[in-house]
Amino acid sequence: MKRFAIILVVMLFTLACAPLEIAKSTLVVLTSSTLAPSTSPLPTATVTLASTAKPDALKQAILYAEDFSEDSGSWTPANDNQSRFYISKGEYFVQIVKSDYSFYNLSSAAYSDFVLSVDLRHIIGDDETTGSMVIWRYVDNDNFYALTVMDDGSYYIHRFLRGVYGMLKLPTTSSWLNTTGKPNNITLVANGDSNVLYFNGHYEASFQDSSITTGYFGIGAQPALDSEVEVAFDNLYIYQYDPGNGFTPANPVITATPEYQTLSWLELTRFLSDDHTNWGEYHLEDYNCMDFAIDLVANARSANISAKIVTVQFVGQPTGHAFVAFETSDHGTVFVEPQGDNTYSNVHIGNNLCDDWGESECMGTIESIEYFGECDHAQNCTVIP
């Protein structure tokens, strides 16, 4: 086993006037102060792992099992001045000092399709900023999925892909997670590009992503700059993915993802005329260009209209900008400035970002462009898988 210290990236946006600054480094600290949990929708399915299969079939279905009743040494590397991994009284403990780093141990075997089940509990650490971590399909430090569970009942799902960090699930409060140090069972079903998450036997969330198809699994903990952390794990199992083996949960009844519609240019102008996001008052700290973009996208989706948040970084400038992209049936992608409902037609790397209406000065030469599926007002954003 190896232990890895990984600095996670956060979608931190530092803005001035209208500009937006996106973290330039691939590896940036994920600070707990950026996490503002929302409330998750009511799940619609439960996990049933009581198997009626024959004993031989049960044995074959178990790919990996560890109850931490004995210390074989495979999960307990040498301690250092930042972390400690140890087994005691049938549990696996991870301790980390106050730090920007999260520490993991990884399995020695890689898996593609599987069902992972593990019990975890939070022992010490800030309830909102420190937590337990489960990693899967880990290829290297630049490619893996991870789940972080906090003791306040919130969680988020993140991904490193070719060294670029992105959230796949915004920080969310789950009604199925126990809090205040009580244990939680985490069940993860990975099959092809489907990843389904259950908490304590109840369906919580899922996502589709074919970026990483196989890799190692791991467990660890996330501290904070102002809080150490200690977590414990038990009953770690990896089962074969097989709907008939009794260890694979039945497919949950998942509320269909809304299919947002494209619209014509005329319909877009009517929507923008009726929408009053541009009436908002800009404030550097409380309501900046990112907030305008977040609200315009939310209003569009409430009207069943396809829209995405766009962020650009400018050459030689510490700040960038955020606006919104709409898909239209007759004009293709239309970029709208939510602070004034004016448009940009030159959103390409190397171009100067200029208002089509000539109402404001050009902002600068575009160095990079990013699209996000969803952001909250704490400026956590999900990538588009």
Image: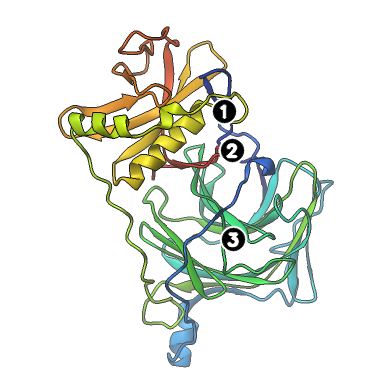
Visible residue check, residue 95? no
90 on left or right of 343: right
Measured from the top left, where is residue 87 in percent x and y?
Answer: 77, 68
From mark 1 to mark 2, how far is it between C-alphas?
8 Å
Q: Please, what is the three-letter code of the amino acid marked with disc 1?
A: Ala
Q: Which residue lies furthest to the left in this view?
A: 330
Disc 1 to disc 2: CB gap under 8 Å: yes
Query: Mark on residue 23?
Result: 1
Q: Nearer the viewer, residue 101 or 367?
A: 367
Question: How many marks can you see?
Answer: 3
From mark 1 to mark 3, how far is it between C-alphas?
31 Å
Local SS, label 2: loop
Q: Residue at x 20, y 29 (%)?
A: 265
Q: Residue at x 76, y 53 (%)?
A: 126
Q: Residue furthest right?
A: 81
Disc nearest the viewer among 2 and 3: 2
Disc 1 to disc 3: CB gap under 8 Å: no
Q: Which image quadrant is residue 243 in?
A: bottom left
Circle 3 crowding by C-alpha within 10 Å: few under 14, some 14–19, many from 20: some
Disc 2: which residue? 9
Q: Earlier in the sequence, mark 2 or mark 3?
A: 2
Residue 17 vertical position relative to residue 41 in the rendered view, above or below? above
Q: Tell me the quarter of the image containing the C terminus.
A: top left
Q: Please, what is the three-letter code of the amino acid marked with disc 3?
A: Ser
Residue 134 vertical position relative to residue 90 in the rendered view, above or below? above
Disc 2 to disc 3: CB gap under 8 Å: no
Disc nearest the viewer among 1 and 3: 1
Q: Which of marks 1 and 2 is nearer the N terminus?
A: 2
Circle 2 crowding by C-alpha within 10 Å: few under 14, some 14–19, many from 20: many
Measured from the top left, where is residue 14 in percent x and y?
Answer: 59, 26
Q: Which of 315 and 64 is in front in this view?
A: 315
Disc 3: which residue? 107
